Structure formats: structure tokens, C-alpha cells
Image (cartoon, coloured by chain):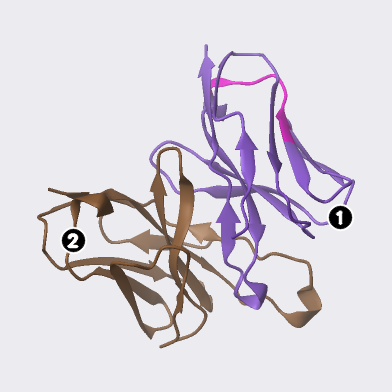
Amino acid sequence: GQQLNQSPQSMFIQEGEDVSMNCTSSSIFNTWLWYKQDPGEGPVLLIALYKAGELTSNGRLTAQFGITRKDSFLNISASIPSDVGIYFCAQNYGGSQGNLIFGKGTKLSVKP
Amino acid sequence: DVKVTQSSRYLVKRTGEKVFLECVQDMDHENMFWYRQDPGLGLRLIYFSYDVKMKEKGDIPEGYSVSREKKERFSLILESASTNQTSMYLCASSPRKQARDRGYNSPLHFGNGTRLTVT
């Protein structure tokens, strides 16, 4: 079946550093979604991308929809302790039902 | 704000027990989902439902069944719990995507999860 390859698997960074993670697939997609899961909670949608080449920001987060439509990047600038969590890329593969497949996640740890 | 409520945060069950995980959403969403989350494997779809009494298998349905008797409630059932079903279970809901929203993915709204341990 379809697979999303997300990297890195984990990151340990110092507060204030910038972070970059990415997701790739062998399939072409029309959208890319990025979710964040805070410790002890369910994932929450951060950014949705709908067009190849699109660059979208949400505060200190910036995500890009790759021009080949097979990849996406999420960048976090000037990280803070509350950025800690697991970040997932996701894709819709279920037509109108909206069911998603997820990457395996990038676990981010931020040292104050 | 959409609220997806999972009835238990933590459950401990014995091998062979029948286990019910309950999920309720308050936004009249048509679609509901059950995922399990395991370290290094991400979120994997077990079952989903796009209407009352409708259900579809996801990627890993073996050992599970579901029930959707009312629109707001979606139950995950482990008929005979096994140790390899120890996991975090996440319920989610979303509105049905309209034809005019082609290309738009309705975001999934997740509950806070049920951590199930089978001993």
C-alpha cells in the first residue's frame, strides 16, 4: 500500500534552534497535511497544503508542498520548549471518507 | 470547538477478555475512525465509519470489530484481547467531504487516546 517516509525519526535540539523535517512518498498527492501530537494528547492539525510549490506559514512553522508533489517539508524556527511532541505528515487516501495515512512521526525534544 | 471524547485514558485487561473502547464526538460529524499508535510505527488505521451502521476495514482490522449504532458514537471492540494489542488507541472524527471540496481534506479531530495494556 501507500507509504509515507518521514525523517528524521527523532531530534534533540537546543531551545532557539531551527528545526527541519520532511516527508516523501513514491506516489503523487494533491494535498499534504502536518499534525502535531503533544505528550498525552491526540494529534492536532498544524498546516494543510493544497498546491504543488505552495509555502504556508503558521506562526513559527512553515511548510512547503514539494514541486514534484511527492514530498513536503516542515520547518520550525527559533524552537521553544512547548514545541516538544511528535510531528506527523499525513495524506488522504480514502476519497470522500477522509481517512488518512500517516508517516511514522518525528519526535522532537527541546532542551531549555 | 470539536470535542472527541474517549471514555478511558488508561485500561488494563487480561488476555482473552472482551474489551470495549468508546468514543463520542459532539460535532455531528459523519466520519469516525479508530487508529492505533505504536512507537516507530506511527498511526495505523484499524476501522472507519462514514455513516451510522456503516463500517469499513482499515489497514489492520484483524482482531478488532466496531459498532456505530448512533452518529455520535463509535465503539472499538477487541473480541479476545491479546498482548500484541497493547497500544495507544486514538479515535477521530471529521465531516464528510463535499464534492465541491475536491482536493480539500477535512481535518481529523482526535481524542486524547486510550492506553490499553493487555497482560
Q: Which range is magenta?
A: A74-81
Q: Which mark is residue A39?
A: none
Residue in view at x 73 percent, y 52 percent? A32
Above or below residue B15? Residue A93 is: below
Q: Name the colour assigned to chain A in the rendering.
A: purple
Crowd rating for badge 2 (residues with CA inside 10 Å; few <14, some 14–19, many 20+): many
Residue under numbered circle 2: B81
Of residue A81 and residue B86, the one placed in the foreground of this image is: B86
Residue under numbered circle 1: A51
The answer to whether residue A89 is left or right of residue A105 is: right
Of residue B79 and residue A38, the one placed in the foreground of this image is: B79
Above or below residue B48? Residue A8 is: above
Crowd rating for badge 1 (residues with CA inside 10 Å; few <14, some 14–19, many 20+): some
> Gap between marks 2 and 1, in whole Å?
43 Å
| Secondary structure type for disc 1 | loop
Instruction: Indicate the quadrant containing the N terminus of chain A: top left, top right, bottom left or bottom right.
Output: bottom right
The answer to whether residue B91 is left or right of residue A76 is: left
